[in-house]
Amino acid sequence: MTDEQTETDGKQAQTDGGGTGIVPPDDETPTWSERKQRTEGLSRLTYEYFERARREDQDLRQESSYVERDVLAFPVWPHEMIRNLSLTSFFVGMIIFLSATLPPHLGAPADPNSTPAVILPDWYLYWSFGLLKLGPLNPELAILGGEKLMSDRAYGVVANIVVVGIVAIVPFLNKGSARRPVEQPFWAAVGMMGFAFAWTISIYSAKNLAPIAPHLLFDLTFLVPPIVGTITYAVLKAMREGYMFDLNRRYYRLRPPK
């Protein structure tokens, strides 16, 4: 092979931009001004940055004996910006598409002189509204002659304070270095229980609209979360010795504690 052929092949490899799916190595990567002159557009440019980031990450992991998440990173520009712009463009496009094809229905204007049959807050406050309906759990104390210690409304407010307090204190109870749920199945199960309870108590808040008997819906509100937590714990416990746990140990090796 002559020197001219070698130089020609090198130039072709350096300017390779279509069809091969191969991104040039770091020392052969075109400059930003050269990229702007290309006609492939944002899709090709995005692919090249993703591919280069993947290769750099792979090289770093092969060269190092351990990996720290706060050490391995990529520049904000262009790697992170290209990725974030791609994801943002996708979701914005989906929102525009849904708003164009499925426009929201605008009902009749509110009438201040009539009270609706069912009053509900915004959807993200259903869980709090459901806690205000926990009157059946408010105990009737015999020492007070069968009277309740507090009203059902006050009991619901206390329930909100307790639930929010539990959510706030959990991060202080679990200070582990886990990166994935499979590393700590117990706390992952606790999180899934809380997630399931948020759904069940939200459904219970709209019990007037649910096609289930109120007493059955009340029982399911407190039975479903432990079942979800148990299933989550069992599944993650079974995965600890399998592929996902080995993959996690290999992908995020932490520095041993001093």
Image (tube, rainbow, N blue to C red):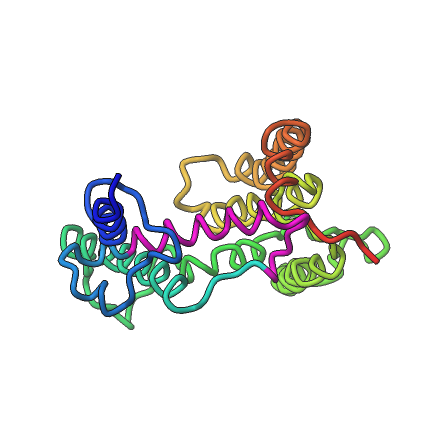
Residue found at the far front of this picture:
2
Using the image as rendered, state which of residue 112 and residue 256 is in the foreground: 256
Measuring from the top left, give residue 228's x and y in whole percent: 59, 35
Residue drawn at (19%, 63%), measured in percent from left and top? 108
Total number of numbered discs in the rendering: 0
Pick the quarter of the image with the N terminus.
top left
Using the image as rendered, state which of residue 206 and residue 166 is in the foreground: 166
Rendered image quadrant of residue 231 = top right
Measuring from the top left, give residue 17's x and y in whole percent: 22, 50
Q: Which residues are magenta?
A: 46-71
Rendered image quadrant of residue 250 = top right
Rendered image quadrant of residue 92 = bottom left
Horizontally, is 240 left or right of 21 in the view? right
Residue drawn at (70%, 42%), measured in percent from left and top? 184
Horizontally, is 75 left or right of 239 in the view? left
Residue drawn at (19%, 61%), measured in percent from left and top? 106
Residue drawn at (38%, 58%), measured in percent from left and top? 27
Decide whether the magenta segment is chiefly helix, strand or loop. Answer: helix
Pick the quarter of the image with the C terminus.
bottom right
Residue found at the far bottom of this picture:
112
Residue found at the far right of this picture:
143
